[in-house]
Amino acid sequence: MKITLYYAPIACSLVPFVSLNEAQADFEVSPINIRGKEQMSPDYLKLNPKHKVPLLIVDGEPLTENVAIQYWISKTYPDANLLPSGTWQEAQGLSLLSWFASGFHPHISRCNAPSGFCDVPGTEDNVRNLAKKTLMSSFQIADDMLTGQDFFFDHFTTADAYFFWCFRRTGMFDVDLSGFKNCQAHFERLSERPSVQKVLAFEKETLAKFKARS
Ligand SMILES: N[C@@H](CCC(=O)N[C@@H](CS)C(=O)NCC(=O)O)C(=O)O
């Protein structure tokens, strides 16, 4: 099986990158420079007309959307236990992934590019502030879920990888997350995992290559 992950530094494609590392999968990574608009190139649009990462190509067939990609990785590498087992618990895992994809990610996108959501001049701060408010209340819910727990379930799952990205990316904006002690501890715990450290090292290298090219 030939697997290629289309990945961009900082972006949510970190999540399947971590999961594939956790699964010890044999895969290639194809870096995309989002700032350089490589996702809009005709070649990339042929692969993913939605012009987004992550994109997984498995034996020539594309799979888009983080939740679906995480599901596929967890089913393809069952030994890695990337979702909890049993139909009910698995659904709980999908529930968390869906929440991160729909309850966090779009608000993070608003912080990143507010004018893509409202183009009325002078409204950028309003869009950002509303998004931050929603994110803060969602982080409070996640913080409560993580009380007394190392992970969202009784072991590491792909939901932890997705939440790691949400917390890391939100922290890159002018927002104080220090009050979310359980989320912070979860973030530090995840940062120490070899699967995550590998991705962060790759990210650093890739950003340096992009900079050298520009
Ligand atoms: N619904 C998609 C969202 C993916 C997404 O928004 N990716 C961003 C990076 S975090 C992206 O590729 N943006 C580039 C663009 O929109 O042109 C998913 O969950 O996979």
Image: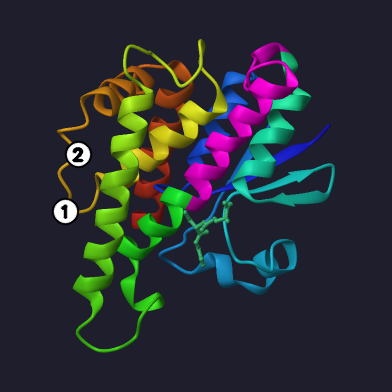
Residue type at mark 2? Answer: Leu
Look at the numbered disc 2 and give the secondary structure of its residue.
loop
Residue bearing mark 1: 174
> Image quarter for residue 25?
top right
Q: In the image, 145: left or right of 94?
A: left
Crowding at dot 2, Cα within 10 Å, few <14 / some 14-19 / many 20+, comes out as: some
In the image, is residue 181 above or below residue 172?
above
* Residue bounds of the magenta highlight: 79-102
Would residue 73 be counted in the magenta stretch?
A: no
Count the numbered circles shown. Answer: 2
> Image quarter for residue 98?
top right
In the image, is residue 196 above or below residue 9?
above
Which image quadrant: the C terminus? bottom left
Q: Say which residue appears at 36% left-offset and 55% top-offset.
A: 108
Residue bearing mark 2: 177
Q: In the image, 207: left or right of 21?
A: left
Q: Say which residue appears at 31% left-offset and 39% top-offset.
A: 139
Instruction: Please state the horizontal and vertical placement of residue 19, each as a whole percent of the image.
Output: 58, 28
One can see residue 26 in this view: no
One can see residue 150 in this view: yes
> Image quarter for residue 187?
top left
Instruction: Please state the horizontal and vertical placement of residue 91, each as a whole percent of the image.
Output: 66, 30
Residue type at mark 1? Answer: Asp
